[in-house]
């Protein structure tokens, strides 16, 4: 008994010392970060103008300690990898929910308006309906797109018409000192995101919002329910925005959990992709692209299953129907069942049966949406195109008549944008670039592929060639879709492309690289323990990258010198 008590005492002492060491590390990190902000960004900027440095330090230390507790609890109480990963993905996405200022994600304003309308019980769309004053105040205060420079020397300005004859309607770069004090006083709320939050709290509805040209209801339905619940609790429009973001993050997490459950192999690659800062940024917004990314991961995970059953075929058909209904250029996912390794096919369905079923799912969703648009969309009139010179039929005829030139345009667009890999660190509504995040995100994907090399897959030459063709053609279809719908006829580059559109291509190419190298390389750990080790390393590295990226995003938006890229 004495020896047992001594052992327990020693174990208790070790745990207590470990906890104290972790707490000390969290406090030291918080102190160092706040001190760095005070030295590098001066004393007068947010958060120091509104929150005392000791309070901010304590808050950051508490947040870091909470993260450490969650890591310990997940390791202690959760057994399955997908459960541990789901906790990590949700916590990381929630960080991006709050470090990203309101309405700064792509198309977030439009999609939040649709979500808020659903929370009011409006399941149809009417251009003549407006919103409460609190929503108008939110869009008045946060109706600007933000950009930043470390030295504060550059301001990109797009000023609304009727404000300043010299700058109205123009988009240009001017020296910071050329902006008069009266101009800055006129836009006092634009000097920082913290100032904007104060302006929102003190303002009333100035810019009346009406229901947007955005008619998708299903992707925002759960967000609308969440917003309705917090509205019952008295939340403001700003609180409703954060609630909608949190619901989006939860849906993304659930889809990622299902995808990882499917991953009998290549889980490190999927984990790295799911925890990419750009994916978490979209998941922590009101944009349905966060949900789409989760569906992409779920669909691609079927390539990693040991056995494809009839239930899997039905679930894939449902996912295919939803993703293609939201964005028709996802029709190419129809080819995924055809390139799956034959040894994994354990169902009475033929592969072409699965493809036909998926296509039928798309037509059902498409017909339902057509009926909805016919009977539940009111008073919008003719909806014009965003860019002059766009003609879908004209562009399609041009592409068919000049296929070689079209391929050259696509390749040139990829080349001049570095294959969009540097966009892995682009955030915000106006492409706020954090280069270190871009480089680290690409490295994390490659690390995920390297950690999956120990897998022995059922890959055949045919399935490998099929996956490569699917990845390449998918990127081509994405570019073709925007070339037809968003680019003036015969333009020598594709307009509207963003990095998140290519994440499925990156994922498929990394999976293919890991599968091919698995027959060449022999990692130095046993297969029995290799899975656990590789997945744990991928999860730990990717979570660290996500946390650091969230801190950098907070630094750029709330701490560093703030400049403004006008109104939307």
Image: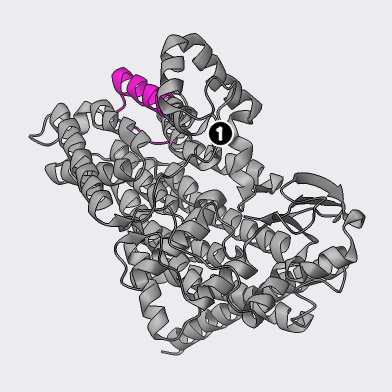
Place of residue 53 in the rendered image (x, y in percent of width and height, measured from the top left): 78, 80
Q: Residue at x 36, y 53 (%)?
A: 215
Question: Is 273 located above or below residue 547 in the figure?
Answer: above
Q: Residues within 10 Å of mark 1 (few under 14, many from 20)?
A: few
Q: Is residue 305 left or right of residue 191?
A: left
Question: Is 316 located above or below residue 226 in the figure?
Answer: above
Q: Quadrant of residue 475?
A: top left
Please tell me whether residue 464 belongs to the stretch shown in magenta. yes
**What residue is disc 1 on?**
388
Q: Is residue 34 visible?
A: yes
In-front residue for pair 182/319? 182
Place of residue 410 in the rendered image (x, y in percent of width and height, measured from the top left): 53, 22
Place of residue 102 in the rendered image (x, y in percent of width and height, measured from the top left): 58, 65
Question: Is 243 located above or below residue 316 in the figure?
Answer: below
Q: Quadrant of residue 49?
A: bottom right
In-front residue for pair 339/477? 477
Q: Which residues are magenta?
A: 451-474
Question: Is 529 located above or below residue 476 in the figure?
Answer: below
- Helix, strand or loop under label 1: loop
Q: Residue at x 31, y 39 (%)?
A: 304
Q: Is residue 273 left or right of residue 164?
A: left
């Amino acid at each position: 008994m004495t020896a047992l008590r001594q052992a327990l005492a020693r174990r208790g002492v070790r745990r207590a010392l470990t906890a104290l060491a972790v707490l000390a590390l969290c406090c030291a990190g918080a102190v160092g970060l706040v001190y760095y902000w005070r030295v590098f960004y001066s004393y007068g900027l947010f958060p120091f103008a509104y929150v005392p440095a000791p309070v901010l330090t304590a808050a950051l230390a508490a947040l870091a300690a909470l993260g450490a507790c969650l890591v310990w609890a997940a390791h202690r109480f959760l057994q399955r990898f997908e459960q541990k990963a789901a906790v990590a993905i949700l916590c990381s996405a929630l960080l991006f929910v709050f470090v990203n200022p309101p309405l700064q994600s792509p198309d977030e304003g439009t999609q939040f308006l649709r979500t808020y309308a659903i929370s009011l019980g409006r399941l149809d769309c009417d251009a003549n309906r407006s919103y409460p004053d609190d929503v108008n105040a939110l869009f008045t205060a946060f109706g600007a797109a933000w950009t930043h420079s470390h030295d504060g020397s550059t301001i990109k300005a797009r000023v609304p018409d009727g404000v300043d004859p010299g700058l109205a309607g123009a988009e240009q770069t001017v020296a910071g000192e050329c902006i008069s004090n009266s101009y800055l006083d006129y836009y006092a709320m634009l000097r920082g995101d913290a100032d904007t939050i104060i302006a929102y709290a003190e303002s009333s509805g100035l810019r009346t919002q009406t229901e947007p040209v955005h008619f998708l209801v299903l992707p925002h339905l759960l967000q609308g329910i969440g917003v309705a619940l917090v509205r019952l609790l008295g939340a403001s429009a700003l609180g409703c925005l954060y609630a909608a973001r949190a619901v989006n993050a939860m849906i993304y997490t659930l889809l990622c959990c299902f995808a990882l459950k499917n991953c009998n192999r290549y889980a490190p690659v999927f984990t790295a992709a799911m925890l990419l800062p750009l994916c978490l940024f979209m998941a922590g917004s009101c944009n349905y692209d966060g949900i789409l990314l989760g569906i992409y991961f779920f669909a691609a995970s079927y390539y990693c299953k040991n056995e494809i059953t009839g239930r899997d075929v039905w679930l894939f058909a449902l996912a295919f129907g939803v993703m293609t209904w939201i964005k028709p250029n996802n029709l190419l996912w129809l080819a995924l069942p055809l390139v799956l390794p034959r040894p994994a096919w354990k169902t009475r369905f033929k592969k072409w049966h699965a493809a036909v079923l998926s296509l039928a799912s798309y037509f059902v969703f498409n017909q339902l949406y057509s009926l909805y648009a016919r009977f539940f969309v009111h008073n919008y009139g003719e909806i014009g195109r965003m860019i002059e010179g766009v003609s879908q039929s004209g562009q399609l005829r041009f592409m068919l008549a000049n296929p070689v030139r079209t391929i050259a345009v696509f390749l040139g667009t990829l080349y001049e944008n570095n294959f969009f890999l540097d966009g892995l660190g682009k955030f915000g509504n106006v492409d706020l670039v954090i280069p270190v995040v871009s480089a680290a995100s690409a490295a994390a994907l490659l690390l995920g592929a390297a950690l999956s090399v120990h897998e022995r897959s059922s890959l055949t030459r045919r399935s490998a060639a099929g996956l490569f063709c699917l990845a390449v053609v998918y990127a081509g279809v994405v570019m073709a879709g925007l070339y037809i719908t968003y680019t003036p006829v015969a333009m020598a580059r594709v307009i509207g492309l963003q990095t998140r559109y290519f994440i499925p291509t990156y994922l498929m190419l990394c999976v293919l690289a890991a599968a091919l190298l698995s027959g060449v390389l022999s990692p130095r750990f046993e297969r029995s323990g290799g899975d656990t080790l590789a997945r744990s390393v991928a999860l730990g590295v990717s979570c660290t990258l996500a946390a650091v990226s969230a801190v950098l995003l907070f630094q750029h938006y709330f701490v560093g010198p703030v400049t403004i890229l006008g109104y939307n």
